[in-house]
Image (cartoon, grey):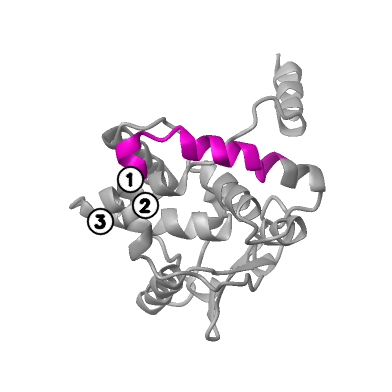
């Protein structure tokens, strides 16, 4: 039995049996708004985590490991991921990084860095709490349940579908080594499907919320 269990785990790691799909941006904005309205501090922080994860194509592990010193502000805000100096790594390897696109996300990260002592994690919300609030929010909105990992799919798919980034730029931003990995995430057809399958009221409300956000640069920086 132990050998069979280890073999199954190895098979699951190396075999893609179920591919994820993106979540529509209008739904994301409605979710963020709902989380911000909650009284619980973890819910409010989860709203920021959703936007950071969507903007930077992050995995939940990347969010969890973000420390004060991983937020670099030189006018353009960057995140340092999988810091080898701390013995960490991302699935794509050690010492990765990504530039932030959206001004409000950059501002939120600057505030987090300022409020967090050196050497400490910037988010006080655990991944379990984050997923719990994520699920509560989607249920409250009456939309399809998806894991937070769908935000990584959303960023890659939307940028490719809208022409904001080329395939190669998406690959670099997502820290993917193989083109096959990008093709699993940056699925243009899945992004259009996610947009069309939203409830009408969520799509309308989400569009209004998106218009209130400051736009990112017209041309992608990275």
Left-right relation of 160 to 52: right
Residue underneath mark 2: 207
Q: Can residue 42 be seen in this view?
A: yes
On screen, 163 above or below 70?
above
Cα distance between the residues tagged 2 and 1: 5 Å
Closer-to-camera residue (106/156):
156
Circle 3 or circle 1, nearest the eye: 1
Left-right relation of 74 to 42: right
Residue at horizontal 57%, vertical 36%? 21
Part of the protein shown in magenta? 184-204
Dot 3 falls on a residue whose secondary structure is helix
Closer-to-camera residue (151/221):
221
Q: Position of residue 200 (x, y in %)?
A: 34, 36
Residue at horizontal 48%, vertical 40%? 195
Neighbour tally class for label 1: few under 14, some 14-19, many 20 plus, Cα within 10 Å:
some
Neighbour tally class for label 3: few under 14, some 14-19, many 20 plus, Cα within 10 Å:
few
Dot 2 falls on a residue whose secondary structure is helix
> Mark 3 and 2 residues: CB-CB less than 8 Å, in contact?
no
Left-right relation of 99 to 132: right
Residue at horizontal 48%, vertical 73%? 68
Q: Residue 41 got which mark?
A: 3
């Amino acid at each position: 039995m132990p050998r069979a269990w280890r073999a199954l785990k190895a098979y699951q790691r190396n075999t893609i049996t179920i591919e994820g799909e993106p979540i529509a941006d209008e739904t994301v904005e409605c979710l963020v708004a709902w989380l911000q309205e909650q009284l619980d501090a973890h819910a409010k922080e989860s709203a920021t985590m959703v936007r950071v994860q969507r903007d930077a194509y992050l995995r939940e592990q990347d969010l969890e490991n973000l420390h004060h010193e991983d937020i670099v502000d030189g006018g353009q805000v960057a995140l340092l991921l999988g810091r080898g100096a701390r013995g960490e790594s991302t699935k794509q390897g050690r010492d990765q990084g990504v530039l932030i696109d959206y001004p409000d996300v950059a501002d939120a990260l600057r505030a987090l860095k300022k409020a967090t002592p050196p050497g400490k994690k910037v988010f006080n919300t655990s991944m379990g709490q984050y997923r719990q609030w994520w699920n509560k929010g989607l249920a409250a909105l009456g939309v399809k349940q998806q894991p937070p990992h769908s935000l990584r799919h959303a960023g890659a798919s939307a940028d490719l579908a809208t022409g904001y980034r080329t395939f190669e730029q998406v690959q670099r931003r997502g820290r993917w080594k193989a083109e096959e990995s990008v093709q699993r995430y940056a699925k243009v057809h899945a992004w259009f499907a996610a947009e069309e399958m939203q409830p009408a009221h969520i799509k309308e409300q989400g569009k209004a919320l998106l218009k209130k956000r400051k736009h990112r640069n017209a041309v992608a920086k990275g």
